[in-house]
Image (cartoon, rainbow, N blue to C red):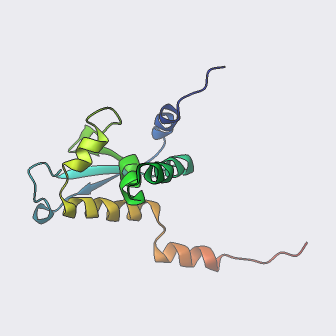
Amino acid sequence: MAETHPLAQASALDAGRPKHEFTIPESARTLATDPKQVCLRQLTIAEEMRAVNASQALKTSAAYELIKAAIVEADGKPVTWDAGGKESFLEGCSPKVRQLLISAFERVNTPQAKEVEDFLASATVRIG
């Protein structure tokens, strides 16, 4: 049986994964290439691991590789893995927009304080 490429596997998961849309404030768009709107998705654990491994192998920041994996659309158009896709998109973003993308990634993938509080409050102890 042929093995499915990891990116193809991730694409198969996209059908059920929510996409989170964010509007970039005009004041943060300092370059002509900055998008007005972006769309990110939650990452699977395998995608997170690949991004972190890529950051180590390429000597780039983990945040950069995680954003690259999470970004799926900009201004209503797909941002893909092909040549001129995700790398070019991020190269065209100003520092402010890149920082906003990091903040969006954290919002999408990190539990809020209330979620952590509720989760920890639900703890019970079982013996045996």
For residue 1, say whether it is visible: yes
Q: Which residue is drawn at 54% across and 74% down?
A: 116
Residue reaching furthest top? 1
Residue reaching furthest right? 128
Tell me: residue 123, above or below residue 47.
below
Q: Splitting the image into 4 quarters, where does residue 109 fall? A: bottom left
For residue 19, say whether it is visible: no
In the image: residue 118, left or right of residue 31: right
Q: Splitting the image into 4 quarters, where does residue 125 fall? A: bottom right
In the image: residue 58, left or right of residue 13: left
Q: Which residue is drawn at 19% across and 59% down?
A: 24
In the image: residue 67, left or right of residue 98: right
Residue 77 coordinates in the image, percent (x, y):
24, 38
In the image: residue 97, left or right of residue 56: left
Residue 55 coordinates in the image, percent (x, y):
43, 53
Q: Which residue is drawn at 46% across and 72% down?
A: 112
Q: How many labels does the image show?
A: 0
Tell me: residue 92, above or below residue 108.
above
Residue 39 coordinates in the image, percent (x, y):
31, 49
Which part of the image, by quadrant, shows the N terminus?
A: top right
Residue 62 or 47: which is nearer the viewer? 62
Residue 51 or 4: which is nearer the viewer? 51
Residue 43 coordinates in the image, percent (x, y):
48, 50
Which part of the image, by quadrant, shows the C terminus?
A: bottom right
